[in-house]
């Protein structure tokens, strides 16, 4: 699979499985994409056209990255042989941090499962 397709699969598809390292690093990239426009917004003068632009970019980055967070979590849950619908628990404020840590720390199911043959590949 070409690199561009792997990137699109990792962040935008919910099929297949993803391992701990790819989940963590993908989540880190999504967090950076969310944080950079917010950082630039905080540096810009209040009420300036620049601050308006960065606030809009921060909102767009946040909305666009929501799907990527969901897709990563669904594939990580698939690696643990759990249904992807459980990814919705990531929207519960305090519990989401615990679930994120669990998804980062617990190893996936060895060998094939009902969601795919191997981690880090589409189903």
Image: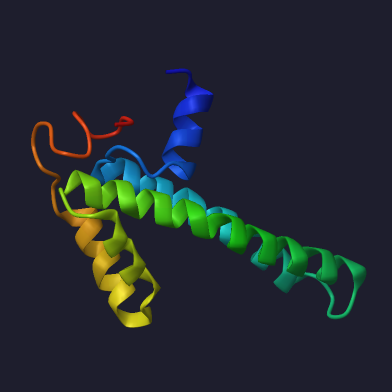
Is 55 placed left or right of 111 in the picture? right
Residue 116: where, in percent of width, then height?
Answer: 22, 33
Is 73 placed left or right of 108 in the picture? right
What's the residue at 50%, 55% (across, down)?
67
Is 86 placed left or right of 12 in the picture? left
Q: How many labels, in total?
A: 0
User: What colouring does the structure picture have?
Assistant: rainbow
Q: Quadrant of the N terminus?
A: top left
Question: Outermost residue, top direction?
Answer: 2
Residue 3: where, in percent of width, then height?
Answer: 48, 23
What's the residue at 24%, 52% (across, down)?
77
Choose top left, top right, bottom left or bottom right for residue 6: top left
Residue 38: where, in percent of width, then height?
Answer: 66, 67
Choose top left, top right, bottom left or bottom right for residue 92: bottom left
Up/down of 77 relative to 63, above or below: above
What's the residue at 27%, 49% (across, down)?
76
Residue 63: where, in percent of width, then height?
Answer: 60, 62
What's the residue at 75%, 69% (across, down)?
55
Up/down of 11 relative to 39, above or below: above
Q: Quadrant of the C terminus?
A: top left
Up/down of 37 relative to 28, above or below: below
């Amino acid at each position: 699979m070409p690199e561009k397709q792997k990137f699109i699969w990792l962040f935008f598809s919910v099929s297949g499985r993803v391992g701990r390292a790819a989940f963590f690093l993908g989540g880190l990239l999504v967090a950076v994409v969310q944080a950079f426009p917010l950082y630039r917004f905080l540096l810009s003068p209040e009420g300036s056209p620049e601050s308006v632009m960065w606030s809009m970019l921060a909102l767009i980055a946040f909305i666009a990255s929501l799907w990527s967070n969901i897709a990563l979590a669904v594939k990580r849950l698939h690696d643990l042989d759990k249904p992807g619908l459980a990814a919705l628990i990531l929207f519960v404020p305090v519990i989401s941090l615990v679930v994120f840590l669990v998804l980062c720390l617990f190893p996936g199911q060895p060998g094939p499962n009902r969601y795919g043959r191997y981690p880090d590949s589409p189903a």
